[in-house]
Each structure stands twice: as structure tokens, then as C-alpha cells.
Image (cartoon, rainbow, N blue to C red):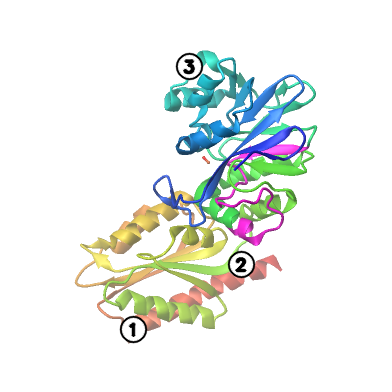
Amino acid sequence: MEPRNLSNKVKWMGAVDWNRRLFDTLIPLPDGTSYNAYLVEGSEKTALIDTVDPAMQDTLMQQLKGIERLDYIISQHAEQDHSGSIPALLKKFPQSVLICSEKAKGLLIDHLLIDPARIKTVADEETLSLGDCTLKFYMTPWVHWPETMVTYLPEDKILFSCDFLGSHIATTRLFAGRDPLVAEAAKRYFAEIMMPFRSFVKKNIEKIRTLDVEMIAPSHGPVYDQPAWIMDDHQDWVSDRYDNLVVLPYVSMHGSTEAMVDFLLSALVKRGVNVQKFELSTTDIGKLAMSLVSAMTIVIGTPTVHVGPHPTVFSATHLANALKPKLKYAAIIGSYGWGTKAVEQISDLIPNLKVEVLGTNMCKGYPKEADFAALDALAETIAQKHRAHFAELK
Ligand code: FEO
């Protein structure tokens, strides 16, 4: 696409990656993504904020064809989807200076082999004059890496936020408006990328709320021209608010674990608790991550394979632990043929989840009357815990 104006001084550039379906060879991108760069043309100097994934470098180079002089390249985040084209840009614009945080400097040198002589670091709240406008940098660590910063253009009240507040969605729309598809993509993005850094997201939201912002321009997804809702949504996701929800990821090999899962689901719903069930061999793990954003309880269901949990459950549990959702309660259910250590092995996989374990229930073969009774009792325990939580809030 051609560059598009955000204001008289600012142009959107970058690439929409319609076909990308995985990030980090792990994270599902069902709706693709974009890598946004922003050209800011002051009366004296010109700066480019972020670049694009190197696979789409040619698109950015084409957009920059008419630009004879680029004084500054701002790297807000060293990860390759935003900084991977910097080496080519430094070559194309030999007079340009690379601006980044102190922490980003080492990462850019290590990851992209950039000549340190081309780099100038900036500190929190440092400014850079472009003549009739100014870029002001704010350090926002851990959204997404430790070196990340955002850039504020006070004259136009635009905040360039890089990964922070972004969304993975390919679209021709420049502005998000109140599009529910963007809201969904932003929640997926938060769940898959930012959830482990909840406390930092919270602090950084507070930091940017002190600025007078009319537009938030992330480096993934469309620009927020009504920025209040995206900040409010993030504030909710990092808050202590829970949904009355049990997330139930599971795998079943011969139907025993599935029978337990379905029984527990019904027993919970009967007691007024919502459930989201995910069959892990086919599920979109991004959807699972989204469900964990505000869920109160997780119940993991697994058959036994060679004494331990099914490898697919092992992998999903490891991922859930890495995402550090704000869960309060957990339980493990499942089945085995002749012996099992699945509960012990799953428990060892979730040290990051600060949960109270409400029960474990592994049955030999197909569940029998006593197993269903135990599941009914587990459903009652979970429902009581949920009721008690919401009663405390009244
Ligand atoms: Fe969009 Fe952390 O990179």
C-alpha cells in the first residue's frame, strides 16, 4: 500500500502481512498482522519510527523512494518484526542516526549486528527536536521486551506505542474506530504476547494516561483514533476482576477423559458457572490464551501416556504456565490404564500459576459411579469458591 497521512507531519508506512499465520513459529495469527512504521517530517529533520519485518523490507523501501534524507531511525523495540529492516535503512540513508533506549542498544548490536557508532541512546522523557515538532521518549519496559519505549508527538497528540496496545490483524483500515474485530484481535494479542507482563502493562498504562493523547499508533494493527477504549480494555485485563468462568483444556484418547470433562461441564453449568472447553489436539491456542485472561479457574483434563500426561496436554500446560494468567483455582482430572503420575507431572509444570488446587480426580479406565460423584463434588467446590468470591465484592 501507499503511505497514508495520519496528520500533516505524520505518514503511516509499513506492510500488511495478510498471509502470516504463525508468530515465533508458535503463536497463531488467524487474521494475519501488520508491521507499521511512521514517518514524521519536521521543518528541519525527518524521523522514521520503527521499520518492518525483514521479509517485507521491499515494501517499506518502495514507500521511502521519494524521501531523500532521513535523519533519524527510531527503534522502539529491538525485536526483528520492527527492527529487522534497520540494517538496510542505515545503508540506504548513510547520514541517519539510530535512536533507541540504552537497553535496546546492546540488543540491536547482538541481534542485528548494527555498528555501535550509528546509535544514539535516549533516556526516559528525553526529547528530540525535528524543528517545528518534537519527539519525546518514554521508557515502557516489558511491553514487550525489557528495552521497549514509546514515542510521543505532543504537537499532534499522537503516541507511537510499538507492540504495546497492538493487535494482530491484517486490514486495509488505517483507523480502528470501535471495530469489534480489532478489539478481538487486540485481546488475542494481549493474551498471547503481553499477559505474562501484566504488572508492567499496568504501570505503563498509568504512565501513558498522564499524556494528552488523541491517537495511539501501534506498530501492529490499525491506529486507535478513539484511544480511550483500548486503554480501558487493557486496564480491565490487568485488573483483579474475574469472570465466573472455568477454562477446561483437555485431550481424550478413548473417550474416558472426555466423559469426565463433559460430566464436569454439565455439573458446573447446573451450578451457574460458565465453562469454556478446549479439545487441545484441534484448538487454536490463541483462543485458549484469550479465555485465560479473566478466568477464575482452570481444570486440566488428560489421559495417561507412558505414566505422564498426554504430550499435547503437557505442551499446553507449559504454555499456560508461561503466560501467567491471573487464575485463582485449578484442578486436574483424567484417566489411566494401569498406573499414572500425570497429576504430579502436571503440578510440576505450573509453578507460575498462583492457584489453589481444588481437587484432582484420575480414574482407572472409563469413569464409574464413584468417579462421577467425585466430579460432582469438585463442581460444587468450584461453584462455592466462585460464589464466595463474588459475594465478597458485594
Ligand atoms: Fe512486534 Fe515484540 O514484536
- The answer, for residue 148, to whether it is visible in the render is no
Along the line of sight, the residue nearer the viewer: 151 or 34: 34
Label 1, secondary structure: give it: helix
Task: Provide the residue designation for mark 3.
Answer: 115
Query: Label 1 crowding class (10 Å Cα cut-off): few <14, some 14-19, many 20+?
Result: few
* Badge 3 or badge 1: first in the primary sequence: 3
**The N terminus: image quadrant:** top right
**Picture residue at 45% right of the left edge, 64% below the top:** 330
- Nearer to us of marks 3 and 1 is 3
Whether tag 2 and tag 1 are in contact, CB under 8 A, the answer is no
Label 3, secondary structure: give it: loop
Along the line of sight, the residue nearer the viewer: 22 or 328: 22
**The C terminus: image quadrant:** bottom right
Counting from the top left corner in percent of width and height, residue 347 is at 36, 57
Query: Label 2 crowding class (10 Å Cα cut-off): few <14, some 14-19, many 20+?
Result: some
**Picture residue at 59% right of the left edge, 15% below the top:** 95
Q: Is label 2's Cβ within 8 Å of ligand 1?
A: no
| Alpha carbon separation for disc pair 3 and 2 | 55 Å
Task: Provide the residue designation for mark 1.
Answer: 370
Span colored in magenta:
157-184
Task: Provide the residue designation for mark 2.
Answer: 389
